[in-house]
Image (spheres, rainbow, N blue to C red):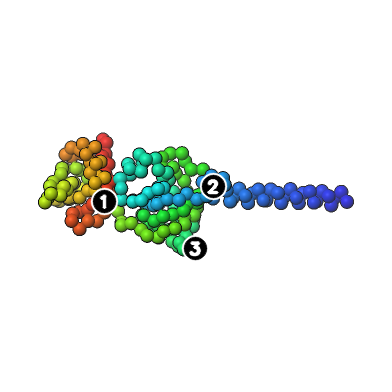
Amino acid sequence: MNKRVCFLILAAILITFGAIGCSTKENDLNHEPGAGPISGTVYSIENGRILVVSNLEDVNIPRSEWFEQGERAVYFAVDEDTLVELNGEQVNTDLIARGQEVDIYHEGVLAESYPEQGRAVKVVITSSEAAKEAYTDSGRYIGIMVNESVKLLEIEISGVPQEMESRFFRITDQARTIVDNLDLEAEDEIIFHYLEDEESDGLIFDLTKIEN
C-alpha cells in the first residue's frame, strides 16, 4: 500500500513540473511574460535584421522623425529558424519587405537599447503591401544646384572613379530640413537613403553626416 502511495505522489510531482516547463516555453515566445506580440511597420531590412517601428504611417521619412518622438522601435534578427506567416500559411523570409505591417513574437527579454534588440521566433505579416525599394549609398557632398526652380543635391558617390560625374538627387521636404540643420559644407562625407526617381538620380528621404 505504501509503495502505491509513493508512486502516485511521484507521478503527481512529475506532471506538475512538466506543466511548468510547457508554460515557460510558451511565455518565451512573448517579449514579456503574459504579453502579446510586438506590432509595427518594417522600416528597414539590413544584415539579417528587420527594424520594426510602431505607429509609423510612412516608411519614407527620416529616422530622426520617429526617433525623436520616442516611438517603439526594435531590431529583430531573422534567420532560417524564424517562422514567417502570411494569410495563415508559412512563407519564406524573403517575402518580408519594407512598409509591411507585422506582428513579431520573440524569445527572452529584449536588449534595453534604442532601438531595442532581439531575435524573431515568428513573424506574422498582417498587411503584405510593401513600400518602394529603398537604396543606401555614401559619398561627398558637393553642394546644391538649382535646376528649373528644383533644388538638387550634388554628390560624388564613394567607390566611384573621380573622373566620373557627380550625381544629382532630389530631396523630400523632411530631408531638406535635415540638410539645413546639418549645415553641410563641400566635401563633407554623408550617408543617404533614397528611392528611384524619374526626375533625378534619386529621391533622398534621409541623410546623415559622417563625423570624422
Tag 3: residue type? Gly
Residue to which mark 3 is pinned: 88
Residue to which mark 2 is pinned: 35
Q: Looking at the image, which residue is at 24% across and 41% down?
A: 177
Of marks 3 and 1, which one's residue comes earlier in the chain? 3
Q: Nearer the viewer, mark 1 or mark 2?
A: 2
Callout 3 secondary element: loop
Callout 2 secondary element: loop
Q: In the displayed structure, does residue 45 sit left or right of residue 181?
A: right
Q: Residues within 10 Å of mark 2 (few under 14, many from 20)?
A: few
Residue to which mark 1 is pinned: 194
Q: Looking at the image, which residue is at 46% across and 39% down?
A: 112
Report how far apart the C-alphas of labels 1 and 2 lie in the structure.
36 Å
Q: Looking at the image, which residue is at 51% across and 43% down?
A: 109
Vertical position of residue 124 compared to residue 119: above or below: below
Q: Is residue 171 visible?
A: yes
